[in-house]
Image (cartoon, grey):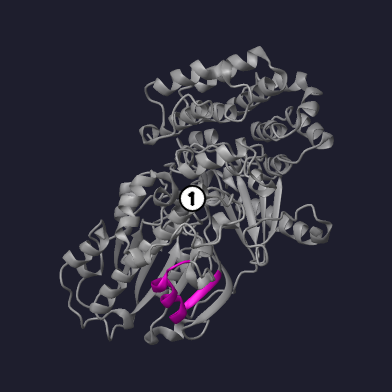
Amino acid sequence: MKLYKNLLLAPLFFNSVTYAQQKPNILWITIEDTSPQFIGCYGNSDSMTPVIDKLANEGVRFTNAFSTGTVSAPSRSSIITGVKTYKTGTGNHRSEYPVPGFIKGFPYYLKNIGYYTSNNAKTDYNVANPVEFTNEAWNESSNNAGWWNRKPGQPFFVVFNFMNSHQSRTMTETYSWYEKNVLEKLPENERIGVNDFKMPPFYRDSPEMRKQVARVYNSVKLTDNEIGALLKRVDDDHLRDSTIIFFFADHGEGIPRGKTNGINLGYRVPFVIWIPEMYKDLSPWGAGGVVTDDLIDFEDLAPTLISLAGGKVPDYMAGKILMGKNRSKPADHLVLSTDRSDNGIDLVRSVTDGKYIYSRNFMPFMPQARYIRYMEIGEIKQQMRKDVAGNKLDSLQKSLFEDRPAEYLFDIENDIWETKNLANDPAYKKVLEKMRGKLQMEILRSRDVLLLPEYEVGLISKTTTPYEFRLDKRKYKVENVYDAASLSGFRGEEVAANQIRMLGSSDRFVRYWGIVGLRSQSQNILKSYSKEIVKAMSDSYPPVAVTASAISFMAFENASAEENLKRYAESDNMDLALMAINYLLYVDQKLPFISTIQNVYKMDGRSYNVKAACLDFLGSLSLVPNNPDYRE
């Protein structure tokens, strides 16, 4: 194991300096892409995670811990800044938009009060100037970083990130790669076989799918072993009795329907805090072996760490302090979000109280299993597409490939795999309305800047930061924008009539949400408004014109719309190009665009996401193989 070798090669450390210190050492153990449903201490008897289970059994296990997002870079943006991504504008995956200079990577505040801060080694913070941002936060960020480089007696905050549960291991890399890099690193008695677990019900229970899902269990098992090696080093250096240990995943499971998807499976994470006897007084939950249903999300981590270290929490951090003398009042709900992942555009906002999760799909014309290149090249996704084409899936399994409803409401206490949407069940009307209200309140209070298309976020970032722009009530009339966006995804004649009226607004963002909302309407309804939609193809705001062209081609077979979409796909603005190609992924008639997309893929200066979307388009027509040569 590479990490363990690094630990062994690290300088031997003086072992006596931490016993009498007043400030706690803090160790973060983060793992990738893992849902609690695949961890032993969360009730999965098929999983083999003895190290994690022991840590939980001796510590505090959280049953209601959630990532703020469903893919790594946005989640890490919230972790490192202590600010939700719909405020900073950093919710779109692998973007580099600026944040205000006063927003620091939170270890900066620990450094300033004497802590040694080290990160081993993933950053992926999704902000502009990432090298400068990272260097300001950490004393060291590298594959060799650890507590051993601190000064004598200096308290530390150190992070170790383990990659072997990442989506690349569990589904994206080839099976032969997985065998060499995961399976063969496990002793045979520690391997989980293809028939040694219960299949999630949203997957077909077939030998082909079992072969793929077994990858999750074995990748998590290898990760558990690596965590054991790290904790042994902590013990060997006699640091356990002075170190608070946090263990958690960066978001939900990295398999289709989990990662990138705005439901519980994408958000909920395993989360444990292990507290030594020396610092038991900091725990509001009691001694070890405790389970708590406190609601927490990643916005809470930065203020909690700063407070534990004895620092002053900056005013811009709105998260809760989870433990210690300054502990905040526990939350009664959380608001979570997911936006673009790689080339897969989306916008979902979610509310959970721990018992229910409500998700508002603002672009539900794309399915849960939408086109994202990093998933499409995985054998499990290819098998699922074969199964849906062969009519081998039940209604739940097939729903992953169908348009989404505007709203999901799941009982995540009694339906952990989210098999039954309760949004239209009259018995849950009050729950639904309560969740809707809390979401609206947060969107308006926070002035959610990601209601704007990414094209606009890019323009804003040339002169200011999205965080600051959203606060300008003259330029950003969020109430008007939300009123328009709040209809998007709902279907029906009355909704469509309102959306058509929005196309006449002087506010370009209102027009944008009017046309995006129309994309979810049926063709019969759209044909009643062909004149207005075709006219919108000439709108002065490009995101409106692109979307109107996509609708006009899909619903009316409009020749000018076809030419517009080809032109926008070739745009030098990567956000407009991606928007156009993304729409083309979900039209039935793709043939007129084949040569254009082939040419775009070959053009110089195209972003990864645009090229990936091109490959997804061509792959959907079986014009390129889904193999590693096409991973970019």
Location of the C terminus (image quadrant): top left
- Say if 76 sits above or below 573 in the image: below
Note whether residue 475 is visible.
no
Q: Provide residue 68's location: percent of width, then percent of height.
A: 53, 56
Location of the N terminus (image quadrant): bottom left
**Start and end of the magenta stretch?**
47-63
Mark 1 is surrounded, within 10 Å at the Cα level, by few (under 14), some (14 to 19) or many (20 or more) other residues, namely many
Q: Residue at x 35, y 72 (%)?
A: 26
Note whether residue 174 is visible.
yes
Q: Camera-side residue: 81 or 492?
A: 492
Residue 106 lies in quadrant: bottom left
- Say if 324 sits above or below 267 in the image: below
Q: Residue at x 59, y 49 (%)?
A: 204
Q: Camera-side residue: 255 or 291?
A: 255
Relative placement, left or right, of 523 versus 400 is: right
Per the image, the residue denoted by label 1 is 71
Relative placement, left or right, of 225 versus 200 is: left
Q: Is residue 49 magenta?
A: yes
Residue 357 lies in quadrant: bottom right
Q: Is residue 601 magenta?
A: no
Q: Residue at x 58, y 50 (%)?
A: 203
